[in-house]
Image (cartoon, rainbow, N blue to C red):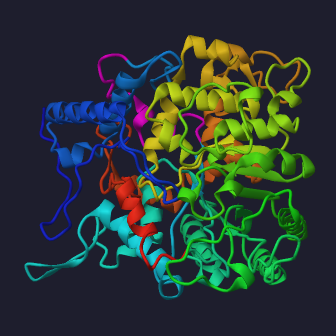
Amino acid sequence: MAKAPKLPWKETWPDVPEDVPIDVMPASNGEYVPKPPTKKQLQIMALQDEAVEHWRRRFNMDRRSFVRTAAGYAIGVWAINQVTAGRWGSYAFANDGIPGEEAVDLENPGAQLANLPGEFILDTQGHHLDAAGRWRTENPGFGQFLQLWTSQAMGQMPGVDDGELRGFGFGGELDWIENLGRYHYFKEMFLDSSTTVSLLTALPNLPDATNILPVAYAKETVDLANNLSKSERCFMHAFAQPNRGFIRNGMTPIHQAEDFAWMEQAAKNMPIYGWKLYCGWGDSTFGTPPPLGSAPPMNGWWFDDDNGIAIVEHIRMICERYDRPKVICTHKGLAFNGTFDSAKFSPRDMGVIGRMYPDVAFYTYHCGYDGEYMTAYPGDEKVNSSNRSVDAFIKSLRENAWDATQFVKPGMEHGNTKNMYAELGSVWWNVMNDADQAAHLLGKLITYVGPERIVLGTDCIWYGNPQPQFVTMRALQFSDEAKEFYNLPYGLDGDRFDPRKNALAPSSYTKKHPNVKGWPTDNKAHPERSIRNGILGRNAAKAYGMDPDAHRGKISTDQVQAMRDAYILNPMTPREMATFRSNQIIGPRTRREFWRYVNSPEYTP
């Protein structure tokens, strides 16, 4: 076999990591303490490392190059399957539905950057920050946190080696915050992954001028991506908070009117397509900043208290006034490590507020997940909705008679909640390394939230490149027992409008469906209708008023695609390579690393 070309490289450039493509070791997005690695995680990494060394020699490639290929990704999925495939799930690839074999199938296109048939990936939780924002001088605690966060993941700080400037991290940034900035966001999302459209979501802090991602800066990113592509590759959220200037319960916070006025001006002047909220984000009494080193304020809010109802009403009003989709996204679950008002990160109020405002789409970010081991829903009598977990989120819907089982149409066996969406940011990252847990997560969300109401967000760039999350979502297969248990005869390949039908089988589309309008009758497979492709992006596209197929047509010939075509080597082969993918996780990897910043005297979130 001819020797494969090496990555272009200069000795003066920073060293390129040779990490395996799918890193399953614990990591955090900054909102929770990472757990110690499990025995299975260690086994997956060792097996993957061994296979990478074997196959890169077979491919006659250096390791630096091989770990950036589609074959390297296929090995990662294979290793997860070898260790975790079990009673409920396994990993193969979406185009064949066959569980992984002992041999590594390096030819399979499921690990490629190119989208699979019908695939439209809308990542509903993307992040970056403004490296030159006011927060760097006015909110030094965040700077301290991010310095420790990125330095442990990316290596030594900038300096001088042999008379030459050395940057920080794989990108060679002299300013370490730039590793979390716009350039790397654009590169990771649109060049190094299969992302079709990215939602740049908001981060907590008001006033907006000192947010680590002010709306004006987010708009610049959106405009850059969309003007460059001449199509809609990116859109944005803004952060909202009803309790800034908290006085006491029963009194309107000092800054609520000011912040609501700012929200309306932002909606009027900016392309805001949804609002991001954090119920547990407390505010200092009377709006006075806390002294350095003090504990975060513990005066969050619930959606069904005065502050919560006030902000929902306000968002509904401004969305109607400025013709925006009525979408409210809220962090639920991951408890900020006991800081802030963590009790308010319980999903208890989601069923309540969803039923009160059926015309608003509510996205429960993280699905209420708080690090629990994923099993089948144990039953209402065993779950308390005031806890933090995916089961608590389901219980909140069920105790308010607002879960998917309440909306099963005549002649059907699966329903969808009217307006509640389960967002998978961080929860998918944490369970994708275990096929059984992954199957239970999606199985119970399909049952109780609905196959049309689950959306994939990656929480990247906090976890580095999002591609591992897409590849594992493509690859997950339900076992026969799981298919029967969750009444999903075709697993994630079932038609999301009627999961009893196989979206990959032409025979499913020969005649009209008695209970589903617009059912295809062309005797062709319709992979775009699968539950899998719904989760990857089509469900979210519908909620945000996008036409995925029209987008796909425009995007296939836009300038970003042209950049990707020039950037990707050996497309649609096992040697397909994203030349400069970093393969690194940015967030904290251990408890010690995380608490270094929380205990810092400069910590002032």
Instruction: Identify which residue is drawn at 59% across, 54% down.
Output: 335
Q: Is residue 39 above or below residue 150?
A: above
Residue 566 vs residue 350, the one in the foreground: 350
Q: Quick check: 151 left or right of 477? A: left
Residue 22 vs residue 69, the one in the foreground: 22
Q: Quick check: 369 left or right of 408? A: left
Residue 330 at x, y percent in the picture = 70, 57
Q: Can residue 114 be seen?
A: no
Q: Is residue 170 above or below residue 520?
A: below
Q: Quick check: 244 left or right of 579? A: right
Residue 347 at x, y percent in the picture = 73, 48
Q: Residue furthest left?
A: 162
- Residue 107 lies in magenta, yes or no? yes
In the rendered picture of this protein, how many numbered marks are placed on residues?
0
> Which is the main secondary structure of the residues drawn in magenta?
loop
Residue 495 vs residue 508, the one in the foreground: 495
Q: Is residue 581 above or below residue 407?
A: below
Residue 148 at x, y percent in the picture = 36, 69
Instruction: Identify which residue is drawn at 31% across, 74% down.
Output: 173
- Residue 111 lies in magenta, yes or no? yes
Q: Quadrant of residue 591?
A: bottom left
- Report the quarter where the C terminus lies: bottom right
Which region of the structure is painted magenta?
Answer: 101-119
Instruction: Identify which residue is drawn at 17% across, 50% down.
Output: 6
Residue 153 vs residue 368, the one in the foreground: 368
Residue 562 at x, y percent in the picture = 45, 57
Instruction: Identify which residue is drawn at 18% across, 34% down.
Output: 59
Q: Can residue 418 be seen?
A: yes
- Report the quarter where the N terminus lies: top left
